[in-house]
Amino acid sequence: MSDGPAGASTPVAVAVLRISTALVVLAVLGYAYGLRLAAGDGNPFDYFGYFTNQTSALLAVVLLASGATAIAGLRSSPAFDLVRGIATASLIVVGAIYNTLVPGTGSAPPWVSVLLHVVLPLLAVLDWALVPDRRRLRWSALPVVLVHPLVWLVVVLIRGRTDGWVPYGFLLPANGTPSLVLHVVGLSAAVLAAGAAVWALSRRASRPAARPRG
């Protein structure tokens, strides 16, 4: 999962900011779902079938737990650092795909899309890169970043073949098998690349300080 000693302690200000961010994200997700309910389109399997919503909710829970743990004076576990790294990598992919392949799509208000697809991924990366309160992630654990995206893809493709629902147009069965395979491979590669960047940042920024000479 991770190696080396635990990272530096989390500053209280950072812990409070993480908790605040998590609460805002959860509130925004609830607000957007409420809009769908009001419009008569409140199927939870559709709303939470979006990778953006799943990943945003995951990161919110991680940030909430991280902030609460830090305020309690505790350090995160290796498994928790791994989950946080996975969530950060997934948010990078969310931001990249939305702003390149599907910009401006979706039924949510524009400000909700900007918050979840631009602001949150940027905050996640900055938090991971600038606050060295996590362990180095082992390269051998990198493939774990694919578990959630691949399970999500399998479920989406099955739904596309059965009830016709897919969250993003490029995953429509009507596009043909070659297109679907190309996008699945591309998404997997993007997740691995984002994960590699997150893993590299963890090892660079979490390196123990050199001992003073003399």
Image (tube, rainbow, N blue to C red):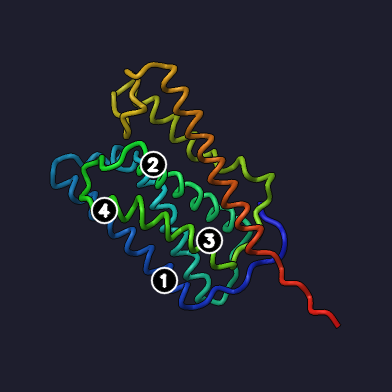
Closer to the observer: label 3 or label 2? 3
Q: Amino acid at mark 4?
A: Val
Is disc 1 in contact with disc 4, using a CB cutoff of under 8 Å?
Answer: no
Please name the residue that numbered disc 3 is placed on: 128
Q: Which mark sits nearer the N-terminus, 2 or 1?
A: 1
Q: CA distance from mark 2 to mark 1?
A: 24 Å
Q: Say which mark, if any, is on residue 112.
A: 4
Q: Secondary structure at mark 1?
A: helix
Q: Which mark sits nearer the N-terminus, 2 or 4?
A: 2
Q: Give residue 63's quadrant in the image.
A: bottom left
Q: CA distance from mark 1 to mark 3?
A: 13 Å
Please name the residue that numbered disc 1 is placed on: 17
Is disc 3 in contact with disc 2, using a CB cutoff of under 8 Å?
Answer: no
Q: CA distance from mark 3 to mark 2?
A: 21 Å
Residue 146, percent across and down?
54, 38
Vertical placement of residue 101 versus 202, above or below: above
Q: CA distance from mark 2 to mark 4?
A: 15 Å
Q: Which mark sits nearer the N-terminus, 1 or 3?
A: 1
Q: Secondary structure at mark 4?
A: helix
Q: Amino acid at mark 3?
A: Trp
Q: Give residue 26's quadrant in the image.
A: bottom left
